[in-house]
């Protein structure tokens, strides 16, 4: 029969750190016998032997760096969007080859254009342009981010439909991947709201588009109603 040893009580005089949790501090500059004397392990004098992270990227030893010698010209708008342009003659050529098929219920989107090789980089979205409108012979149905006035007139003249829909980067990637388990984001900036609620742009949130689009669900109808209320509201001043 074994006897149980009682647990040792914890007092201030028997508290100690866990074994191996503490290490002795490296004492540098205390003589050559320690191995870290003289230069304290940093080698001889020089810029890299000093404390700190060292010279920042682009430092050229004190002379004027090349980034300051070259003048700055132009302006880069961080809010600008770059669309992948697709002309009507290119769409007709892909339709003739059987690489693009569209119906009012299943229009041509960025996914079909990317999978068929019509565009190789959708960038910030697809923009349909009217170049080569004389080559378009039949009706096509397209949903893109933007479209020119000439492209809209040519497509609708031949019995097709085109609607411009807002895509943020995540919604555009979901469209390309064919994901439908997530709700696409709605426009948040006033400029985008005004653009996509205007029927002249064939915006998908305009009341006319909601009545004609076969894929307009209850959410799009509610968004269209909410986004178009500001047009009938007036600011009240005291």
Image (spheres, rainbow, N blue to C red):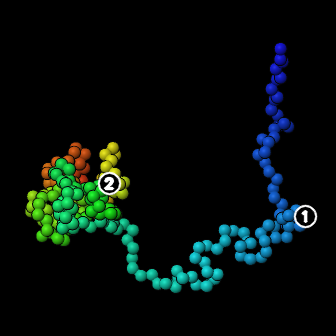
Confirm whether residue 228 shows in the render.
no
- The residues tagged by marks 1 and 2 sit, at their Cα atoms, a distance apart of 67 Å
Whole-percent x, y for residue 77 in the image: 37, 71
Q: Residue furthest front?
A: 97
**SS category of the residue bearing label 2:** helix
Question: In the image, 206: left or right of 71?
Answer: left
Numbered mark located on residue 228 in the image? none
Quadrant into which the N terminus falls? top right
Residue closest to the eye, 86 or 143: 86
Residue at 79%, 42% in the rendered image? 19
Marks 1 and 2, the one that precedes in the sequence: 1
Outermost residue to the top: 1
Q: Secondary structure at mark 1?
A: helix
The residue tagged 1 is 33
Residue 61 percent location from the top left of the image: 64, 81
Residue 34, quarter of the rendered image: bottom right
Query: Residue 8: x, y in percent?
Result: 82, 28
Whether residue 169 is visible to the viewer of this picture, yes or no, is yes
Q: Using the image, determine if residue 62 lies above or below residue 27.
A: below
Query: What residue is shown with label 2?
Result: 176
Which residue is rendered at x = 73% and y = 72% of the image? 50
């Amino acid at each position: 029969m074994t006897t149980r040893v009682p647990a040792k009580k914890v007092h201030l005089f028997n508290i100690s750190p866990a074994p191996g949790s503490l290490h002795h501090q490296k004492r540098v500059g205390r003589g050559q016998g320690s191995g870290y004397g003289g230069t304290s392990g940093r080698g001889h004098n020089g810029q890299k032997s000093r404390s700190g992270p060292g010279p920042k990227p682009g430092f050229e030893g004190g002379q004027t760096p090349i980034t300051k010698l070259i003048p700055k010209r132009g302006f880069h708008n961080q809010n600008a969007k770059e669309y992948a342009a697709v002309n009507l003659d290119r769409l007709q050529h892909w339709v003739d080859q059987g690489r693009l098929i569209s119906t009012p219920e299943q229009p041509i989107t960025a996914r079909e254009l990317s999978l068929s090789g019509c565009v190789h980089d959708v960038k910030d979205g697809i923009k349909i342009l009217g170049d080569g409108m004389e080559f378009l012979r039949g009706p096509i149905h397209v949903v893109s981010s933007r479209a020119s006035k000439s492209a809209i007139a040519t497509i609708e003249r031949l019995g097709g439909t085109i609607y411009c829909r807002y895509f943020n980067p995540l919604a555009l990637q979901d469209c390309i991947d064919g994901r439908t388990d997530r709700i696409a984001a709605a426009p948040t900036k006033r400029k985008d709201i005004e653009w996509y609620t205007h029927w002249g742009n064939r915006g998908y949130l305009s009341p006319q588009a909601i009545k004609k689009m076969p894929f307009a669900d209850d959410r799009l109808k509610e968004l269209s109603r909410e986004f178009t209320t500001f047009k009938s509201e007036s600011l009240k001043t005291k």
